[in-house]
Amino acid sequence: MVIRIAAVGDVHLDEDVVGRFRPALEELPNHADVLLLAGDLTRHGTEAEARCVAREFGGLGVPVVTVLGNHDYQCDEVPQVVEVLEEAGITVLEGNGTVLDCSGSRLGIAGVKGFGGGFAGRCAADFGEPEMKAFVGASTESADALKAALHSLDCDLLVALTHYSPVPDTLAGEPPEIYAFLGCYQLGQAIDSAPTTLALHGHAHHGTERGTTPGGVRVRNVAHPVIKQAYSVFHLGEHLEPGEVSRMGSLGTRPAWS
Amino acid sequence: MTEHRDVDTRRATDAYVSAEIHRLLAEDPEVAEQGITVVRRELGLVLHGEVESAQRRDEILRRVAEHFPELAVTSDIGVVRAQPPTEIEQLP
Ligand SMILES: [Fe+2]
Ligand SMILES: [Fe+2]
């Protein structure tokens, strides 16, 4: 059993970007069973920008599942953005999950935007002014929603999809002073509470690709400026050497560019 | 945009300028970028980071130059490549 997952985050689409991903996306169905988008799909979260996302990532021939990012909230048009994306067949997750049939195996994806708050020893606490409590409350609420979503899915392989990071590992490269705005440990805790196989996130444009949760779940930062390609492809559930990197096409798929 | 100048020297102070550029780039609706860093070099300020289009890269430099006409600002911002991947990662 192998499930092939393509993923990218932080594409920040607007008219000026439409079409840039399309050539690589045309080949995507040859290489992946599903495309996961890790939020910040738009620049300002307008309905018009969501239409750009629908044009670019709609009708791919594989299911597309996404969470929103902080940029997608900027213009307070979240309901319209979600509607446009869903009309294009893109599943938008926020505190819920979906199970997809991938060549006979059930892939469960639980998603939430997440929030900041920081990591062990350097995190915000639910104390003091109402503004601080609201900040920490947002992190906790988001992580609780992710936990509930992860536990609600009946599947063979479980993936957590967030915009904010669940671990500090994949933030390496960002100034340490802003880690608390890039993710929170509660998301990691939620991921570790369930039999999660892989956690994908974006948001940290200057971060690094690989990390693990304290519980040993692999975490990948798929922000576009980090992966520097249209999307990354992960093969899950095939028990080869852990972390082994294969040439694209080595499993019977022919690279379309060869 | 307010000007931040050191009272003694009457020169723009780097720390405030860098903070202002950072906020300008995030909050200006024509830019909305949080991933640009500002580095002080001998010849002035250099902007680093990666954006999604050449228009955005050019707009960032234009905006910063417009707001800080007295500063020498150059840009080393790149446009993120969007080619298909050549490798897959195998996970257990
Ligand atoms: Fe982003
Ligand atoms: Fe973000």
Image (spheres, coloured by chain):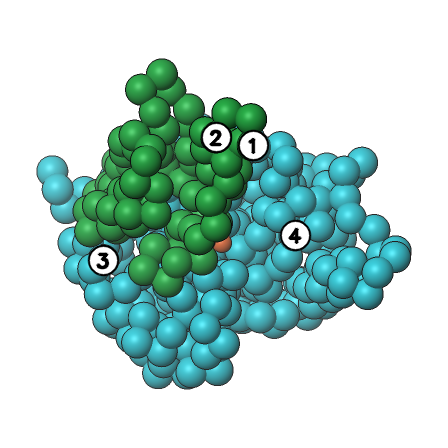
Question: What residue did someone put label 3 on?
Answer: A17
Residue A116: mark in rendering: 4
Question: What residue did someone put label 2 on?
Answer: B10
Q: In what element is the residue under mark 3?
A: loop
Whether labels 1 and 2 belong to a single chain: the reply is yes
Three-letter residue code for mark 1? Val
- Please indicate whether residue A125 sits to the left or right of residue A155 in the image: right
Within 10 angstroms of label 3, few (less than 14), some, or many (20 or more) residues? some
Percent position of residue A59, x then y: 25, 72
Whether labels 3 and 4 belong to a single chain: the reply is yes
Q: Chain of mark 1?
A: B
Q: Is mark 3 within 8 Å of ligand 1?
A: no
Percent position of residue A161, x then y: 54, 57
**Marks 1,2: beta carbons within 8 A:** yes
Tell me the CA gap for discs 3 and 2.
Answer: 42 Å
Within 10 angstroms of label 4, few (less than 14), some, or many (20 or more) residues? many
Three-letter residue code for mark 2? Arg
Along the line of sight, the residue nearer the viewer: A77 or A130: A130
